[in-house]
Each structure stands twice: as structure tokens, then as C-alpha cells.
Image (spheres, rainbow, N blue to C red):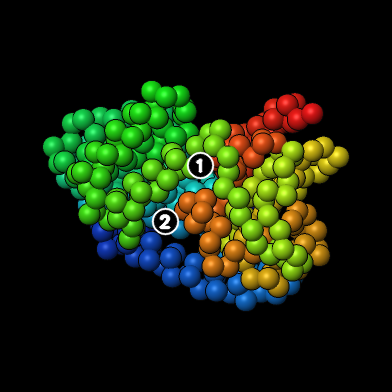
């Protein structure tokens, strides 16, 4: 099946009759989004693992649609209209964990990121329409993106674009360093974003709101801050708190059954839980899935850790979760030591922290 899908994507890339114009590109995107909306509703209605697995096999193929959109968009990367859809495509391709990614997806991701960044640097970094691309570049989490954003922030003639670039830089710096100088630089960049671009919207969210979230992250969710405690009810109906796990290394996983690469992400987490068995370690899930879905997944052994239900998004809001999956790794004093996608960095961080637990 994987081989067939690979051949199909390659055929689309090589022989697609789509012509490069804004209407065609947006048509591909809107078709994907519409199908995803229908699929999300069907996943929420699934009440057994078998039904979920059947629905999961019907998920709109992100690789297929990305390939179609890329084929239509690639010839026009030098044209200004391509900036916004290219930014959206970057975010789509960079929304899944890299660990265990299929070779086809990884190859297409590398091609799209590389060629879009090249086009931005060659043709668009001074464009007045660069604001959406700033957030697309942030989504890559790439050091080359940081350099390009710094160029946009300094050289783009439009102050509003400079402000969005400044915010994207501040967000990237969160992943790169937590020293005092970097923290001060982040605050300066966030201040610039608020002054220059507060009213602007990216994907329906204002820069003012994004900046507010960044200030909250710095104050409450930076490295070595004690993670906010929360209380809730788990899938078994038992009340609990995060603070119950004092003295243990905690991986706090925000997830749901509709996240991209759900099966691969949950497999990575099961392997981590199994590896840590018998150690002062615990994984805690926070999900907005329907209760019946999560119970079925636990009964079938698809999910092997305690999960708090967060259907109203209150815990996710407390941790400023924008997309899933995302992991917080906390030490035995509940201090934040790592934030990022599930995968090898989460495991390495947990391993290192366990050495400090007495």
C-alpha cells in the first residue's frame, strides 16, 4: 500500500495537468480542509478501536494533497501570490514529528522547505505580503529559517511585516536557548511585534494574542519554571492532580486521535512507557477526545498511560497548546526541562532527568 501511494504521489508530481494559478492552488487546499473537517467528525463519532482504525484508514492523505498542491505551486514560487499558500504548505508539512516519518513524506518535506526558503530569499523577503510566510518559516523550526527571519525583520520595508518576523524569531529562540541574554532579546522582539503588528491576523489569530501567549510562556512555561498544577478527571472517572506525581519524572503529553500520524505517535509513547517501567517515571496524557474513544483505546492497549479528559480545553489553554501532539518533560520537582514533539529528544531528556532522582 505504501509503495502504491509513493508511486501515486510521484506520478502526480511528474504528470499533473494542474496549471499554476491561485485558484487551482487554493482549490486543492480547500478540498483537503473540507475532507479533513468531515473526517474529524467521523473520528469523534467512532466508539471502538476497530471503528477508529477503519476511520483512520480513511483519513485524507496529507502527502497526496501536499504533492498536488506543490505541483501546482512550484512553478510560480517567484510570483508574489504564491507566498501565502506556500506558507500554509510549510505548516502542513512540518506539523508531524520527524521520528519514524515515511521516506516519501520526509523527501517531499525537505524539497518544499528548501525551495520555498530559496524563493523567499531570492524574490520575496522585501515583499509587503510576507507576514504569513514568517509564521510558515517558524513552523519549520530550522536554523536557516531563523537567519531568513532575521533578514526579513531588518530589511523588509513594511513595519507590520517586521513585527511579525520579530515575533516568529522570538518563538524560534524559545527552542534554541534559555539564557538571560536570549530571554531579554525575546522580550525586545515581542515588544516590537506588539507595537508594529498587534492588529494583524495570521490564520484568524491576532499578533497581539500570539504575543500575549509568548509573554505567558516566558513567565510561566519557560525552562526551570515549575509547571502549572492542574486537576481533572481521568478516563476511569477518578479525580487527580499533576502535583500527585511529585518525586517522579513526568512526560505530559497533549494528544488526540485526530492528530497527524496518530498511530506512529502513540506507538512512540507506548515504547517509552514500556522502557521506563519500574523507574520513578510517569506519562500523563491530556486529551480532548470523547470519553468512549479513549476508553476503547485503553482497553485495547493502544494507550497505556493515564489520561485526563480536557474536552473544554482548559488544561490545554493553561499550557498554551496550539497543536497536538506536544510533550512537556518535567523533572522530579515538576520543573519544565523540555518542550517539543514526541520522539527521541523526549526520551533523552527523561533519561537524563532520571539520573537525578534519588
Which residue is labeled 2 in the image? 68
**Disc 1 crowd, CA 10 A, few/some/many (<14, 14-19, 20+):** many
Residue 95 at x, y percent in the picture: 49, 49
Q: State the image coordinates of residue 161 (x, y, percent, origin top left).
A: 21, 43
Name the one closer to the observer, 177 or 223.
Answer: 223
Between the residue at mark 1 and the residue at mark 2, the CA separation in whole angstroms equals: 39 Å
Picture coordinates of residue 349 (x, y %)? 65, 32
Residue at image x 13%, y 37%?
157
Q: Quadrant of the N terminus?
A: bottom right
Question: What residue is pinned by disc 1?
Answer: 221
The residue shown at (39%, 44%) is: 214
Q: Nearer the viewer, residue 4 or 152?
A: 152
**Quarter of the rendering containing residue 304:** bottom right
Of callouts 1 and 2, the N-terminal one: 2
- Compared with residue 200, is residue 50 higher up or lower down, i.e. above or below? below
Q: The residue tagged with tag 2: helix, strand or loop?
A: helix
| Location of the C terminus (image quadrant) | top right
Amino acid at each position: 500500500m505504501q509503495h502504491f501511494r509513493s508511486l501515486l504521489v510521484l506520478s502526480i508530481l511528474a504528470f499533473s495537468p494542474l496549471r499554476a494559478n491561485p485558484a487551482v492552488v487554493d482549490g486543492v487546499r480547500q478540498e483537503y480542509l473540507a475532507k479533513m473537517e468531515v473526517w474529524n467528525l467521523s473520528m469523534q463519532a467512532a466508539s471502538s478501536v476497530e471503528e477508529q482504525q477503519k476511520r483512520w484508514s480513511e483519513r485524507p492523505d496529507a502527502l497526496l494533497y501536499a504533492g498536488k498542491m506543490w505541483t501546482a505551486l512550484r512553478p510560480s514560487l517567484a510570483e508574489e501570490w504564491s507566498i501565502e499558500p506556500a506558507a500554509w504548505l510549510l505548516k502542513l508539512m512540518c506539523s508531524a514529528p520527524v521520528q519514524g516519518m515515511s521516506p516519501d513524506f520526509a523527501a517531499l518535506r525537505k524539497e518544499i522547505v528548501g525551495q520555498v526558503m530559496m524563493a523567499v530569499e531570492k524574490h520575496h523577503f522585501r515583499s509587503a505580503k510576507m507576514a504569513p510566510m514568517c509564521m510558515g518559516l517558524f513552523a519549520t523550526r530550522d536554523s536557516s529559517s531563523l537567519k531568513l527571519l532575521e533578514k526579513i525583520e531588518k530589511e523588509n520595508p513594511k513595519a507590520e511585516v517586521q513585527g511579525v518576523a520579530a515575533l516568529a524569531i522570538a518563538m524560534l529562540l524559545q527552542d534554541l536557548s534559555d539564557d538571560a541574554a536570549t530571554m531579554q532579546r525575546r522580550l525586545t522582539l515581542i515588544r516590537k511585534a506588539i507595537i508594529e503588528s498587534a492588529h494583524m491576523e495570521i490564520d484568524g489569530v491576532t499578533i497581539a494574542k500570539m504575543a500575549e501567549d509568548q509573554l505567558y510562556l516566558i513567565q510561566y512555561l519557560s525552562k526551570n519554571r515549575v509547571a502549572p498544577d492542574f486537576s481533572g478527571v481521568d478516563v476511569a472517572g477518578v479525580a487527580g492532580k499533576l502535583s500527585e506525581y511529585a518525586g517522579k519524572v513526568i512526560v505530559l503529553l497533549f494528544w488526540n486521535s485526530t492528530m497527524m500520524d496518530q498511530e506512529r505517535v502513540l506507538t512512540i509513547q507506548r515504547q517509552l512507557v514500556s522502557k521506563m517501567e519500574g523507574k520513578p517515571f510517569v506519562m500523563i496524557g491530556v486529551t480532548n477526545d470523547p470519553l468512549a474513544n479513549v476508553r476503547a483505546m485503553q482497553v485495547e492497549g493502544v494507550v497505556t498511560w493515564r489520561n485526563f479528559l480536557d474536552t473544554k480545553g482548559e488544561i490545554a489553554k493553561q499550557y498554551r497548546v496550539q497543536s497536538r501532539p506536544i510533550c512537556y518533560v518535567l523533572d522530579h520537582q515538576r520543573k519544565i526541562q523540555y518542550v517539543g514533539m514526541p520522539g527521541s529528544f523526549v526520551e533523552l531528556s527523561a533519561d537524563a532527568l532520571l539520573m537525578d532522582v534519588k
